[in-house]
Amino acid sequence: MTQTFEVRNPATERVLREVELTSAERTDAAIERAHAALPAWRAVAPGDRARLLRRFADAVDADVENLARLEVANSGHTIGNARWEAGNVRDVLHYYAAAPERLIGKQIPVPGGVNVTFAEPLGVVGVIVPWNFPMPIAGWGFAPALAAGNTVVLKPAELTPLTALRLAELAREAGIPEDVFQVLPGKGGVVGQRFVEHPLVRKVVFTGSTEVGRRIMAGCAAQVKRVTLELGGKNANIVFADADLERAAATAPYGVFDNAGQDCCARSRILVQASVYDRFLELLEPAVKGVVVGDPSHESTEMGPLISAEHRERVRAYLPDDANVAFRGSAPDGAGYWFPPTVVTPRSATDPLVTDEIFGPIVAVVPFADEAEAVAMANDTAYGLSGSIWTRDVGRALRVSRGVEAGNLSVNSHASVRYWTPFGGFKQSGLGRELGPDAVEAFTEVKNVFISTEEQ
Ligand code: NAP
Ligand code: MG
């Protein structure tokens, strides 16, 4: 009997659709079809593969509004964010469509002949996607993988499969062969597990929690399978006394509460220099109370619901009472997995509010004495994904940027992701980089061939 899963709208709790869960057997069959599709896909001339990716990008472009509405319904993302996310898939496809003709090797002179290198595709790539950004994270995996001549099997998160299923339809409309890009909704422990175990999957691209990422890496070790990991974060937003405090406070809610805090790059710790700590909190309060929380399909909404009842319970458990709460914004009553933007001021650096990735709209504001302490506090975590530095002193901005162990930092800004720049984590926030000019190489294997020029 086929198993199904009820996909719900987190803003209304209503069932949107029943989606069939892919079994282990059907996952294996899909992987085998993806493997069988490799020779024909590799044989597509680089210019033709580029054209197919551009047609896929154009199909996404024509469908941006539909994809965005689907994401609002399935994930509770605000309509503005969801349009950006669909547009990001289009842009990433266009960006990597330039890659096939540029996958060039080297020629290296050696005695008695030459060595030539080839950038070979890896084979079948398994992409495992979390529920917090279903569209962009899917695209960051499949676009460079396909451009480099691999075939792709993709598992969306069980909670959020709808846009991935639509992207598979758009790929087919664009002329990408069915077995070259397959979307397999299902459970992590079934579909994702087969990506890890099946020997014909040559690389796993995983985005999700550090806990599951560790297990994926251990599983991949059995076959020395290639793996890229994009994991959690507990990112610091460091505000120095010399910063534009008004701007730092006005933008801090966006830095952490965007996507209801369900963002690996959420700046969920605000470290503020002690001399301006009270002033910063005074400025932050109206900004947090002004965040528009509600129906994510309204154009003016800034924050929607959490993804599920279960996840909201997880977030709630961090605040058994109001002891640490400084102030909070608003949230609707009634149906929907709502949680208000909340600012906490815990006294201890070891409080879980300061150390854990909560993945919800809770931010801890903590004082620091000087630059050295700010860097030490920012680094006092197993994670190292992103962070922000607010200062008007350019020397300090650079010193602190070099001192903080994180893959993506922004100065006087909260920007984390631009598809043409590299993205990824230090320490337990991940392994490898996505996006940017080098991501295609992560989907190739270098082959080195010696050709003798000796007379035969
Ligand atoms: P998760 O529980 O780790 O799940 C991520 C994906 O892995 C889902 O598709 C899940 O399937 C699947 N999965 C679960 N167990 C598996 C297993 N044993 N083998 C193979 N696959 C398995 O993460 P999440 O709760 O969806 O997402 C939140 C986390 O993602 C946060 O920690 C966040 O920081 C991280 N994240 C990181 C980045 C980044 O770029 N660094 C970006 C976004 C999110 P199911 O849907 O069936 O559970
Ligand atoms: Mg999970």
Image (cartoon, rainbow, N blue to C red):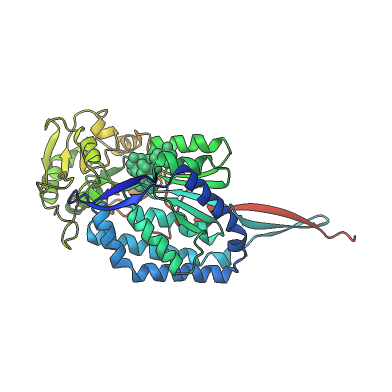
Residue 231 seen by the camera: no
**Percent position of residue 177, x then y:** 51, 64
**Percent position of residue 251, x then y:** 21, 53
Q: Quadrant of the C terminus?
A: bottom right
Question: For residue 355, what is the image quadrant?
Answer: top left
The foreground one among 193 and 15 is 15
**Percent position of residue 72, x then y:** 24, 57
Left or right: 359 with respect to 190?
A: left
Question: Residue drawn 58% across and 68% down?
Answer: 46
Left or right: 58 with respect to 290?
A: right
The picture quadrant for ligand 1 comes to: top left
The foreground one among 170 and 113 is 170
**Percent position of residue 96, x then y:** 48, 63
Question: Residue drawn 36% across and 69% down?
Answer: 61
Left or right: 294 with respect to 46?
A: left
The foreground one among 357 and 6 is 6
Left or right: 23 with respect to 256?
A: right
Residue placed furthest toward the right? 456
Question: For residue 419, what is the image quadrant?
Answer: bottom left
Question: For residue 310, what is the image quadrant?
Answer: top left
Q: Quadrant of the N terminus?
A: top left
Question: Residue drawn 12% across and 43% down?
Answer: 328
